[in-house]
Amino acid sequence: MAKTGAIGCLRYGLGCDWPRRWLWGGTMRGMARMVRNILSSPLLTDFYQLTMVYGFWKRRRAEQRAVYNLFFRTNPFEGGYALVAGLADVLTIVEHARFEDEDLAFLESQRGADDAPLFEPAFMEYLRDLRWSVDIDAMPEGTVAFAPEPLLRVTGPLAQAQLLETALLNVINFQTLIATKAARVCQAAGDDPVLEFGLRRAQGVDGGMAASRAAYIGGCHATSNVLAGQRFGIPVKGTHAHSWVMSFRDEEDAFAAWAKAMPGNCILLVDTYDTLEGVRKAAELGVKLRGQGRSLDGIRLDSGDLAYLSIEARRILDQAGLTSTRIVASSEIDEHLIASLKQQGARIDVWGVGTRLVTGHQQAALGGVYKLAAIERNGAWDPVVKISDSAVKTSTPGRVGVRRYHDQERFIADCIHDLDMPPAQPVEIVDPLDATRRKRIVGSESFGELLVPAVRQGEVVCQRPGLAAIRQRAREELAMLHPTIRRLVNPHSYPAGLERHLYDRKLDLILRTREQTGRGGEQAEGSHADSWNAQKQGEISSDAER
């Protein structure tokens, strides 16, 4: 197999004919080796996931049913929302991740402190035969989300659900972060096109591909990443670098040669030596091209005072009659710089955003987490909670969904609710970090459930929209947010919290768990479930009496 045909499937088997495709490459000794599609390897995980799975298997709990939620604790970039991305990779993991001989051989080689094998042979056979049977409910890509809502809910055998944690967090955390950053950048740019130029500064080949895809979901118009363009159908854009100009005796020759070589893509980089002098030379060429029935499509500024230089460049171009020639700007741009340049009256038509987009500049990671929320004991769901001295790190127990209330123009509020006890009117939503902040939903507002079936018994059951459709969904979702929530700085807080009964039961569970663990005693199996369900029945009776 040719190298060029396999590179895209290194991770992005999406759309590839062979999801199990192999990539050939040479070692330092010249020996060929094969690297599997990363997403098809269950070894894309932290080692402690495998040691826990082994522990569950040893305790005969591997098939015990459990519920995990994937969520983030605070909105990224100190903003008002996040934009969900990465579900396509999650589906690929569930479809294709299988333990193969080389995986098991590697695990068999692992030794403990006593130099004995960590895993026994029977466990290796368990892994060899493992086929996913989990259910996954997820927010579709392009959905706006808010802390601490679950983006995914995984239900199924304890061992399988645990084993998925690292891979799911890897793809959802990064792609959601970059899609959100792109949405913020595009918001700052307004109607101006934003081009994603980040591949050369991305966090590796893998990160570059994921970032290009996520940036397009977030609203970028095109990418410089040619492989992403091929794999995902993203428009590709690019002109020339400073090296083109430097390879000629002078700028005039470089510009003329470029116009001849690329008559349909004549955008000239003008800041190799003296920026405004470069603009003048580009304008002179533009006048000549116009006389030949051609056009100078644009110039690019890649350094310096972009506000001043763009204003002066616009003046020079307009004086030459080149009013349709666009000004493209790059150079460490992000949403805050775009907003500042616009305030300064910069005359920039197109924004090239690279490093600060694809690396999630300002925030290194989304901070998403994956927490056990319930476990089945004696035929009933037993809620569990992770407790912390920091309220933001205390998880939400039980099997929960997310309901979004809306009218025809705006999203109104999001309610995290118990699946076994849907919210009843009037709905009261409690901020889990400040119980005094509450939102009441009274009347007949429309609503929809955000977590929808994606996988059932290990089989993908959801539709797989194309990237353009996901991008359009993101655009429509963002338009449903009040402008104050989309603010780049100090945004208004969107009401997203726990349904009141769920909040009360969470608080009760926290207090009881602290009391029990404080005494050093172990809780009896089923005690949480019994109390949880009894409390539900009391709430139902109380509501009925009202």
Image (cartoon, rainbow, N blue to C red):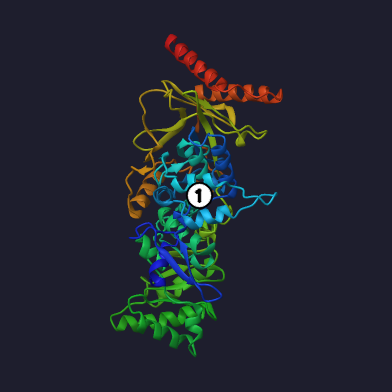
Dot 1 alpha-carbon crowd within 10 angstroms: few under 14, some 14 to 19, many 20 or more: many
Can the viewer see residue 259 in this picture?
yes
Q: Relative to 47, is 374 above or below?
A: above
Image location (x, y in percent) of residue 534: 51, 15
Name of the residue lying farthest toward the left: 293
Q: Give the quadrant of the N terminus.
A: bottom left
Residue 396 falls in image quadrant: top right
Front residue of this view, candidates 420 and 491: 420
Q: Relative to 63, is 347 above or below?
A: below
Q: Which residue is mark 1?
A: 167
Residue in view at x 63 percent, y 21 percent: 512
Residue in view at x 51 percent, y 30 percent: 375
Q: Is residue 446 left or right of residue 194?
A: left
Residue in view at x 36 percent, y 70 percent: 324
Image location (x, y in percent) of residue 358: 51, 59
Can the viewer see residue 165 in this picture?
no
